[in-house]
Amino acid sequence: MDFINKSVVSVNEVIFFSPMDQFEIKPFLGKFLGLSYTPLGWITNISIYIGLVVLFAIVFYVYGNFKDTVKVNGWSLSTEAIYFTIYNMVLSQIGYVVGLFFFSYIFILFNYILISNLVGLIPYNFATTAHLISTLSMSSSIWFGVTILGLVLHALKFFSLFSPEGTPLPLVPLLALIELISYVAKGLSLGIRLGANLISGHLLLLILAGFGFVALIATLAIKLTGGIIAITLITAISGLELAIAGIQSYVYSILTSSYIKDSVSLH
């Protein structure tokens, strides 16, 4: 029964891989360079791609803004568009004074998620934001951060968030419990929303690609119909995933701004 636990199954000389294999976190240097028992053995594919995402972000903004001429180019227009989009979003959500203080953090957060999403869409690459361990780590850190921020700014008054103004006294314990559960769920929902959207998209693309591969080894009629259907669906879903990559980055950033506003303004 050992074959049941394997991710590769051979049927009539056709090998099928588990769609979840693309999300497996594996040692990188330890596997390829034989450094498993050295301090470098902890470096995995997810840590390598996180470093690449940071490097891509630096190169993108340096190349777009550090030029020998003031002539406008496509890179500079892209960086300026992203900058002013996040700038206006942060100021509208948090306010001018506080928004300027947190703008850099939200700007970096947006770019990290956006580039991670786009890198993950490149075939045979690794999607860091499709891992709940990555997205939940970020969202939990944000949740703890905004909670500490609220306690530092307002002390015990911070707990007024859990008791809406004008609530009848008999309903205060029940509503406080509901608001507390809702508040704690923010830290989970922020990460789960991003991870679930990316996971579902990558799984769907891989399943359709597998369907197209199976169609290629079938009869001529199935090759024509199945291949055309698979390619059409993959193209359409790839375009949808590109849109989702940007939308989820913006949603993550705007929700983070909203959580910061709640901690600062208590409403």
Image (cartoon, rainbow, N blue to C red):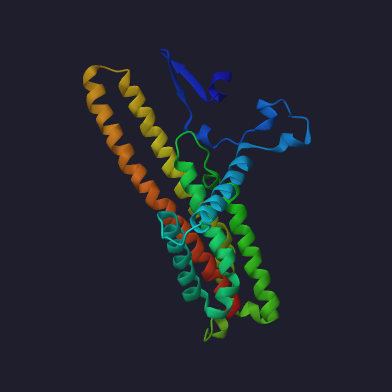
Quick check: can you spot residue 116? yes
Figure quadrant of the N terminus: top right
Foreground pick, 63 / 195: 63
Which residue of the protein is positioned furthest toward the top in this rendering?
Answer: 12
Judged left or right of residue 26, residue 246 is: left
Quick check: can you spot residue 174? no
Judged left or right of residue 255, residue 27 is: right
In the rendered image, residue 193, in percent from the top left (x then y), is placed at 48, 54
Judged left or right of residue 115, residue 101 is: right
In the rendered image, residue 186, in percent from the top left (x then y), is placed at 55, 63
Figure quadrant of the C terminus: bottom right
Q: How many marks?
A: 0
Relative height, residue 250 to residue 217 (above, below): below
Q: Residue at x 59, y 53 (%)?
A: 136
Which residue of the protein is positioned furthest toward the right in this rendering?
Answer: 38
Q: Which residue is drawn at 52% across and 48% down?
A: 116
Q: Residue at x 58, y 44 (%)?
A: 52
Relative height, residue 223 to residue 140 (above, below): above
In the rendered image, residue 257, in percent from the top left (x then y), is placed at 53, 69
Relative height, residue 245 to residue 235 (above, below): below
Residue 204 sits in which quadrant? Answer: top left
In the rendered image, residue 237, in percent from the top left (x then y), is placed at 34, 43
Foreground pick, 206 / 34: 34
Foreground pick, 255 / 127: 127
Q: Residue at x 42, y 43 (%)?
A: 201
